Amino acid sequence: MTRTIVTRVRDRAATTPDAVAMREKDFGIWQEVTWAQYWDTALTAAHALLALGIEPGDRVAIHSENRREWLYADMATVAVRAMTVGLYPTNPAPEVAYLLSHSGSKILIAEDQEQVDKALEVIDELPDLEHIVYLEPRGIQRRYTNPKLLFWDDFLAIGARHRAEHPGAVEDRMAEAEPGDVMTLIYTSGTTGPPKGAMLTVSNVEFCIKELVEEGGFTSPPPSERDILLSYLPLCHVAERIFTAWFNAASGVQVNFAESIATVQANLAEIQPTILFGVPRIWEKVLAAVNIKLASASPVKRLLARFWLRVADGIGDTMVRNGGNHTLSTRLRYAVGWLFLYRALRDRIGMRKVRYAASGAAPIAPEVLKFFMGIGVPMHEVYGMTENTAIATGNMPGRVKLGTVGEPHPGVELRIDEQTGEILTRHPGVFAGYWRNPEATSKTIEPDGWLHTGDVGEWVDGTHIKIVDRMKDIIITAGGKNISPSEIENALKASEFIKEAVVIGDKRPYLTALIGIELETVGDWAQRNRIPYTTYRDLSERDEVIELVQGIVDQVNARFSQVETVKKFRMLPKELDHEDGELTATQKVKRVAMAERFSDLVESMYAGAKAGAA
């Protein structure tokens, strides 16, 4: 029998049935789910899929926040050799229509009334959709009459009947699994066009597990049942699927589902995970929260904290020069700082027990990483993408180089194209192609298996990789200078006062930027400085706030060459939003959409400028 993620769940349920697989809060109490309960529910759900006519290769979509039913439905789908299609909870109805139609999903698992309403709004565009299984009945039961609707409990009841009548049906389907079976369609964020469905196979996922879990990968020692994780990023993203579903099944780590994205900080403090993955925005928000708390502390506490944070900055500097390792001096300084600040600080931010922390999915400012290293959180920047099952490079424990995404994993071939500077990878985790898009597939995968990442990179010391930028995002000024906007943007966003920064300058005489403030931190700053405001726009247009941002821009400009400095900026009048088309579902800025939507602001920064100046 081919080993799959589902056979791993089944086998773990057989060997450690009473161990805790996951926890979820219900009415304020953490409810435990054992491995036996996990597999029993997933198996019943798989029988329900069979009863509803799901065949190998069919698609089952899940539109929900992270919760145990997400994993039940995912494992059930893979068990019957169908494909899981994850949707982001923030996907608006038009995107739901595209994703369900393009994937040809036959069943949709929808969390609640909000997600059901989105599907029903576009139901006429979804001829393949046969059933909508909803998890939360509030607002739906006894009110909605669409015959395609089915409550989760009733769905499981169908599965229970099928299981009683055909007890070996799911196991028979599992026994037919092959390494080339497409296990999931993961839709890319689509910054420049419609999302593309990346097909990941059973063998892709098993390679990922082998590299990251069974061989230790980037965590040392490898994840085990002693580890605790918090699941909070969308499970339709490949990175969260790795850390939540695949780590869990392959190593037995205990998964704890955050109540919501708004409660992540509180849930971190409650759970104190041992392994933590976050996108840059998460790490930036934690750092911003620390600065807010510091600003509102009493003068004595603020003075003490600032002293020990300066010590932490020095510890971080030394560790950066030493590959992420402590020296005798840093160990002594950290030991004293632990008594005065670091223990309490790490406890408050939920990272007291973290033994491995990783940032990925987008570039992050080195200063942010250094802060966490300085207070004792072992931070590692990693790199991968959906199309290579997120396996490419990572900073290994003890061999960290700040500003890089680390070394290629031993199981990964990596080269940089001599002409374009593009990073290419090759290994068994390279995806099977884009669903229903052979043209895009042929442009992405070479006949000899090399994957085009679309990222420009360079070697550092012959061992580590530095990401320059996305090829499509490189700015070529009117003066012919090639500039990476993300490096400048990340430097700006390292400030707790700046949430978004979009650098502009392609075919322009100089660089400019659209800047969005972090409402919470700037609002707190405004209150402390007795600056009245009513709305986000009102606050961002205050002269004092513009002066604050100008100071940050000046500090960042001092670190770059003249041609890379931001000459002018404009404040964004609103917070960027996925539903308004300014961000992707993964919160990446859509540069083309931004340039069009805020064209008046952009053009105002170039009024009267002479072309070719840069």
Image (cartoon, grey):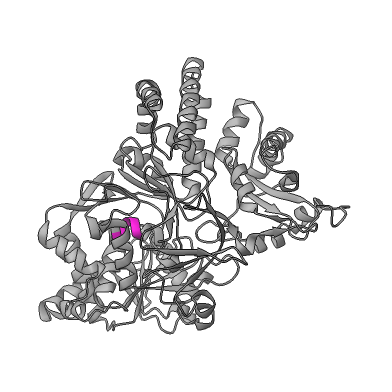
Residue at 67% from the left image edge and 63% from the top image edge: 592
Q: Nearer the viewer, residue 358 or 42?
A: 358
Q: Which residue lies furthest to the top in this view?
A: 300
User: Looking at the picture, does residue 594 appear above or below residue 107?
Assistant: above
Q: Nearer the viewer, residue 202 or 119?
A: 202
Residue 31, visible in the rendered structure: yes
Split into 4 quadrants, where in the image is the N terminus?
bottom left
In x, y percent, where is residue 424?
50, 66
Residue at 44% from the left image edge and 34% from the top image edge: 319
Residue at 61% from the left image edge and 52% from the top image edge: 486
User: Which residues lie in the magenta part?
Assistant: 242-246
Residue 581, visible in the rendered structure: no
Q: Which of 599 and 252 is in front in this view?
A: 252
In x, y percent, where is residue 217?
33, 54
Which quadrant of the view contains residue 456?
A: bottom right
Residue at 54% from the left image edge and 82% from the top image edge: 439
User: Residue 419 vs residue 131: left or right?
Assistant: right
In x, y percent, where is residue 124?
48, 81
User: Looking at the picture, does residue 270 appear above or below residue 507?
Assistant: above
Count numbered badges in the picture: 0
Q: Nearer the viewer, residue 441 or 503?
A: 441
Which quadrant of the view contains residue 183?
A: bottom left
User: Residue 12 vs residue 607: left or right?
Assistant: left
Identify the main secondary structure in magenta. helix
Residue 405 lies in magenta, yes or no? no
User: Residue 359 vs residue 167: left or right?
Assistant: right
In x, y percent, where is residue 482?
70, 57
